[in-house]
């Protein structure tokens, strides 16, 4: 009869729907469990490594990392002679920042500045102890100048003028089609970030003048010295080296590369000096194609 | 002959009838938009004409309304106005349109030209009026002063923003201004500004840290500035420079606009030379400080209850 056909048909649909939801829920739970267990297994391995594990993106084609903050941290670890190993499986930590590290005792610390501070305190490092209080204050000011001002000027060119294409130049592999498609979304999001930070509201020529002023300050202060604060290398040199190396190797098409090489040769010599001292294996640390 | 009122009533009946209602609504909305835009355009021209009457070579400084304890709650306004006084550049103040061509405050009009961003303005004015206040410094001194100013403006500024607009549960900023045009500041503008600045601080990076971490970073900045200043009169010695204006602008927000804040306590307890520095700059360039407040205070009144 028609009424019983309709009701049995309706029961069938409900049964199928319930079955589908159950299958999806079971599969979802299985995937979650697998990911969770894999994560715990990785963390156990990192804690057993007995050294600092640095979690960061894969090496770049032109620099050991396309992120100057990763390069800064790795340079610091080499300067302080702290053994470390790299992990590229989870470059973003719980706080969605990179780099982040797993300390020898398993503690996870994010943000390169916080990591450096933590390592100094734990290991009682005496880097910079020969500096006077005024010199340490100046070192702090230059660290902030490079990381919170010059860095944003570079990002302004990369995103607003270059549409983000520069990101792929230092990367390991040529971009796939979905990375190229995602670049527009990324560039739009970062343009929004630049506007909120403030540098994105200014004409590019003015931003370039700001960056030039920063590079001039660095060059004037460095002068003929081997390192920024004198003849001994310090933590601030790791920061400045990372940003200058970023301009020299990953920003070759930008006006800042020509600005650095043509107008501030002492900064270029400074980068080469640190590279020879702390990165004799620079080429081996690059991504092999 | 039909009376004009009858003609109008006929038109209205025709518009409202049948399927012509969407057309009526569209016509009304467009009419309102055209009227508003015309009024705004006319007012904009009148304002520009008024600013043009300031005179050739007179800077018209467009800023937020005055604060109760400091001439402005914006460090960049205090910076720019301090520079104008230091460089002896004539200027007038306008409160009518504080947000300029780049959506930033302060901005200036000079001989019909509009310029935004405090540092761009200072660079432009120093060329225009031939005021080079750092020419006596060595390259190294200029570099260090520049680094100190950038540290305060690009990093410490955001730490202060996090305190003022995110962490300060008592919302003391509401008591430091009488700004409220159509709607009250505390109940409408402050929450909106707080939301926007919280988002901006997060975009910049400082806002992603916890307050103890932000406070620690701010403390390091103040410590570096205090140590660098030491016993000197001003940042680079005995003469004021453009970078002093930037540093003074930032410190004025802590010293006079942050009652009860941990940043003020840090300065009072650990860095007293920064307070002395601020008072010295204020005495030199802001003898009329009390008259620049809202409401104005008598010149001899003791303003600094917290300092």
Image (spheres, grey):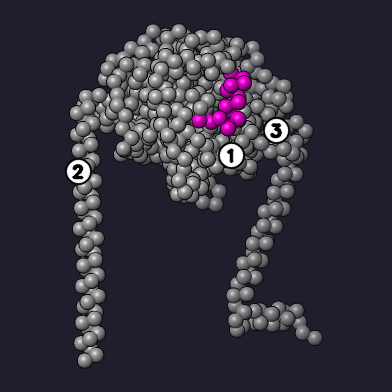
Viewer-side residue, A256 vs B2: A256
Nearer mark to the viewer, of 3 and 1: 1
Question: Residue A251: within the magenta?
Answer: yes
Viewer-side residue, B39 vs A137: A137
Chain that bears disc 1: A
Number of disc labels? 3
Residue A67, percent across and down? 43, 31
Residue B262, percent across and down? 37, 28
Residues marked 3 and 1 touching at CB (< 8 Å): no
**Tag 1 residue:** A161
N-term mark: 2 or 1: 2
**Which span is picked out in magenta?**
A250-264
Mark number for residue B59? Answer: 3
Viewer-side residue, B93 vs B209: B209
Mark number for residue A37? Answer: 2
Q: Are marks 3 and 2 on the same chain?
A: no
Q: Which structural element holds mark 2?
A: helix
Residues marked 2 and 1 touching at CB (< 8 Å): no
Chain that bears disc 2: A
At a point 27% along the width and 17% down the height, the residue shown is A123
At a point 65% along the width and 15% down the height, the residue shown is B135
Give the residue furthest to the bottom.
A1
Q: Callout 1: few (<14), some (14-19), or many (20+) C-alpha neighbours within 10 Å? A: few
Nearer mark to the viewer, of 3 and 2: 2
Q: Which structural element holds mark 3?
A: strand
């Amino acid at each position: 009869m028609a009424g019983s056909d309709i009701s049995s048909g309706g029961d069938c649909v409900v049964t199928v729907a319930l079955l589908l939801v159950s299958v999806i829920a079971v599969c979802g739970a299985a995937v979650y469990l697998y990911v969770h267990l894999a994560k715990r297994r990785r963390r156990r391995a990192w804690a057993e490594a007995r050294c600092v594990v640095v979690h960061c993106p894969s090496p770049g084609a032109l620099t050991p990392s396309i992120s100057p903050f990763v390069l800064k941290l790795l340079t610091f670890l080499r300067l302080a002679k702290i053994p470390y190993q790299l992990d590229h499986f989870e470059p973003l930590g719980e706080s969605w920042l990179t780099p982040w590290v797993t300390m020898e005792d398993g503690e996870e610390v994010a943000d390169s500045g916080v990591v450096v501070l933590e390592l100094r305190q734990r290991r009682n490092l005496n880097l910079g102890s020969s500096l006077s209080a005024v010199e340490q204050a100046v070192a702090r000011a230059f660290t902030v100048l490079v990381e919170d001002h010059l860095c944003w000027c570079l990002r302004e060119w990369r995103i607003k003028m270059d549409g983000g294409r520069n990101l792929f130049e230092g990367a390991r592999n040529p971009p796939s089609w979905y990375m190229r498609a995602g670049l527009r979304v990324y560039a739009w999001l970062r343009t929004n970030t630049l506007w909120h930070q403030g540098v994105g509201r200014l004409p590019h020529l003015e931003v370039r003048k700001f960056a030039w002023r920063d590079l001039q300050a660095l060059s004037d202060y460095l002068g003929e010295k081997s390192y920024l604060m004198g003849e001994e290398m310090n933590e601030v040199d790791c920061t400045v080296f990372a940003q200058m190396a970023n301009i020299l190797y990953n920003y070759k098409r930008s006006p800042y590369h020509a600005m650095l090489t043509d107008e501030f040769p002492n900064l270029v010599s400074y980068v080469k000096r640190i590279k020879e001292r702390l990165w004799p294996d620079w080429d081996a640390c690059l991504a092999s194609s | 002959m039909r009376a004009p009122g009858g003609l109008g009533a006929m038109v209205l009946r025709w518009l409202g009838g049948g399927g012509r209602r969407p057309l009526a609504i569209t016509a009304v909305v467009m009419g309102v938009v055209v009227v508003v835009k015309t009024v705004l355009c006319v007012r904009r021209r009148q304002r520009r004409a008024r600013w043009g009457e300031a005179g050739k070579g007179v800077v018209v400084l467009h800023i937020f309304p005055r604060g109760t304890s400091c001439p402005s709650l914006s460090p960049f306004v205090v910076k720019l106005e301090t520079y104008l006084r230091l460089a002896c550049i004539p200027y007038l103040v306008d409160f009518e349109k504080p947000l300029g061509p780049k959506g930033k405050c302060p901005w200036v009009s000079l001989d019909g030209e509009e310029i935004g961003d405090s540092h761009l303005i200072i660079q432009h004015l120093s060329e225009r009026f031939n005021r080079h206040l750092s020419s006596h410094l060595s390259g190294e001194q200029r570099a260090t002063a520049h680094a100190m100013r950038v540290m305060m403006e690009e990093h410490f500024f955001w730490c202060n923003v996090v305190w003022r607009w995110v962490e300060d549960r008592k919302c003391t900023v509401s008591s430091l201004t009488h700004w409220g045009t159509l709607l009250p500041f505390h109940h409408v503008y402050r929450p909106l500004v707080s939301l926007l600045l919280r988002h901006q601080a997060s975009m910049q990076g400082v806002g992603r840290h916890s307050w103890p971490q932000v406070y620690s970073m701010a403390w390091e900045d103040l410590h570096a500035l205090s140590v660098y200043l030491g016993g000197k009169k001003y940042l680079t010695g005995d003469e004021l420079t453009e970078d002093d204006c930037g540093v003074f602008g930032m410190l004025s927000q802590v010293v006079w606009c942050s009652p009860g804040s941990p940043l003020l306590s840090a300065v009072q307890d650990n860095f007293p030379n920064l307070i002395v520095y601020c008072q010295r700059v204020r005495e030199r360039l802001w003898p009329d400080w009390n008259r620049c407040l809202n409401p104005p205070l008598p010149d001899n009144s003791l303003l600094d209850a917290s300092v």
